[in-house]
Amino acid sequence: MVDTQGMLGNFEDEGWDGYACNFSTWSSCVNSTASADSCNNDPESPCRRCTSTRGREQATHITCTKGSNGGMVFRFPAGGIFPVTEQFTIPPNTAIVGAANPNHSSDKTLQQIDVGGQTWFVVPASNTLCGNDPLCKNASAKGPTACIGDPRTHRQGFLMSSNSMLKNINFQGADLGRAASEGTLCGPGAIELPGCLSGDGCKEWDAGVATTGAGVVENVTVENVRMSDAVKRANIMQMGDDCRSGEALDSDGNHVRAHQVTMFASKLPAREGAKHRDILVSNLVTMNSRADGLNIHGAVQNLVLKDSHIENSGDDCIGIWSTGIENMTIQNTTAANCAVTAGVQSNWGSCMGTYAFKSLDVHGFTCYDPFLKLPAGGCNARSHYTAMHLNHAFANDCMPMGASLSLTGIEYYSSDEPTVPLDRPKCGQCRSCCGSCSTAGFDALDIHYLDDSVPAGSCMAKNAGC
């Protein structure tokens, strides 16, 4: 099994001989401006020094080819385990591609245990945001809040650039608890788009101080990625039916190591007039996160999430926050056991929560709720009452006038009875959440019910537990 002694799941220090190379070496490889020939054949190339010894075939190193856009494609070997000790920016026009698709085509929930046939990126325990403190508040925490500080020290993962790709990899986070925040989500994401460090926003681009990255990006692809599933999984039975503060621990009663947010688009600087554009997220599977799964808090145009599965989050599996979200599509995606891993820090959220967007299409979305009956241990407001909860705003993230939502193929089940529809609304609204925004844009939201999966008019007629 993946979580046995001497294999993945123990999070040994960077010097552990199971790693193909250290972070500095593999990141230097990807940042190299050398030719593909030098990358592949020069024995002094950092790419050549990153050698897998766990693959089933002869040991291989990172190889390089020219991509169709003129950039570089870096292929990481099967059986290679690579430490992620800080946030790594994938350069523009660059692809990081692992050995194989880690997600089973027939059942995305099947755990990937083929160490020798896969490529693995692992955050060592010594480099986690929260150290070994489940509450991430004591002196051992590297960042008691994720809203400030050098992103390299507490945002372990990948920052995407224009024309960048992340494909065919497993990623394992190591945080044991959710980072303390300042009332708004600050990430960090295992995969991020550039934006403000603080959930309250920032004035302008200032990479490494106020922002990750230095500008908006376009043409980003995340495909065939599996997140935080290389250890014993979270089990909702460990919650004791305590919806508010119970935690989905592993079968041994231990906190499950995971990343904070699966994919995060933080707020853009106030002086930025452009948007991220053309973001494709396909076949993304995340089996545990300390906070949200997908969270889009910044302005993005043409983002597609499709053929994906999000499970065991600490907050909403999908959170949609920005007035600037335009032409966002969620297609053929499932969410299960959302808002179950924050525990004593209090579980909030459901399968999908929205606060602001310009246009959103949801076509083929299935929610598996961890609680068959409510109230279960006194759920927090807006948690588990509906598969989708539409909030009128959050702070200054206000639903704009002229916003539209299209719905089709929406299903809602419990995890206990995954074939029996839940007797709760699939979609509901919360006018009381959150902040002082006018309700004008929310009240004018144009909802298109394209089939009978959600009864016409029900999103605004049903209460989402507020």
Image (tube, rainbow, N blue to C red):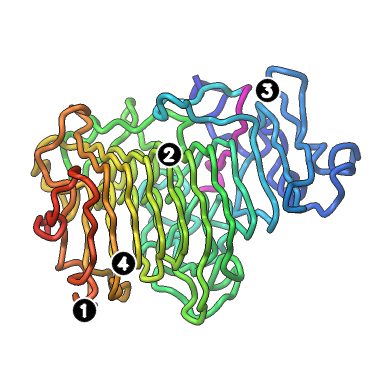
Q: Quadrant of residue 109?
A: top left
Find residue 356 and name its label: 4
Quadrant housing the C terminus = bottom left
Q: Marks 4 and 2, how far apart in space? A: 24 Å
Tell me the magenta residue range: 116-128
Alpha-carbon neighbours of circle 4 within 10 Å: few (<14), some, or many (≥20)?
many
Q: Marks 3 and 2, how far apart in space? A: 30 Å
> Front-most of 165 and 205?
165
Q: Is residue 71 magenta?
A: no
Nearest to viewer (mark 4 / mark 2):
2
The kind of residue tagged 2 is: Asp
Q: Disc 1 on helix, strand or loop? A: loop
Find residue 307 and name its label: 2
Examine the rendered structure and indicate whether residue 117 appears above or below residue 138: above
Find residue 85 and name its label: none
Q: Marks 1 and 3, how far apart in space? A: 58 Å
Nearest to viewer (mark 4 / mark 3):
4
Q: Marks 4 and 3, how far apart in space? A: 46 Å
Mark 1 sits on what residue?
438
Q: Are marks 4 and 1 in contact (CB under 8 Å)?
A: no
Q: In terms of sequence position, does the residue under pointer 4 or pointer 3 come before the other?
A: 3
Q: In terms of sequence position, does the residue under pointer 3 or pointer 2 come before the other?
A: 3
Q: In terms of sequence position, does the residue under pointer 4 or pointer 1 come before the other?
A: 4
Q: Measured from the top left, where is residue 171 in percent x and y?
A: 53, 39
Find residue 54 and name its label: 3
